[in-house]
Image (cartoon, helix red, strand yellow):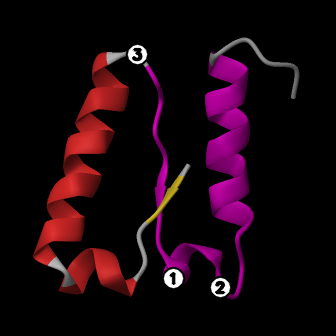
Amino acid sequence: MEYDGEHHFTNRGQCTRDVERWNALLHEGWTVIRVTKAQLVPDPSRLITQVRAALGKAGAPV
């Protein structure tokens, strides 16, 4: 899970590094769930469902 805070959207260098890291993780076969504050507050239930689904798809007991 990657949290994209305000700095991600206001700092071009940070955004570029984040995208490069995200692409590298995908290339290695990782599943990356990107999250913003709006997805966490006030109700993270949809995000929790996404995380559980990703873990289940990867074979983890959920």
Q: Image point 73% across, 38% down: which residue?
A: 52
Q: Which residues are magenta?
A: 30-57
Q: Is residue 11 above or below residue 22?
A: below
Circle 2 sits on which residue?
41
Which callout, 2 or 3, points at the residue further toward the start of the chain? 3
Q: Quadrant of residue 42?
A: bottom right
Amino acid on which the number 1 mark rests in the picture: Ala
Amino acid on which the number 3 mark rests in the picture: Gly
Circle 1 sits on which residue?
38
Q: Is residue 18 above or below residue 43?
A: above
Q: Residues within 10 Å of mark 2 (few under 14, many from 20)?
A: few
Q: Image point 33% across, 82% down: which residue?
A: 7
Is 58 included in the stretch rendered in magenta? no
Q: Give residue 29's mark.
A: 3
Q: Image point 72% across, 54% down: which residue?
A: 48
Q: Nearer the viewer, mark 1 or mark 3?
A: 3
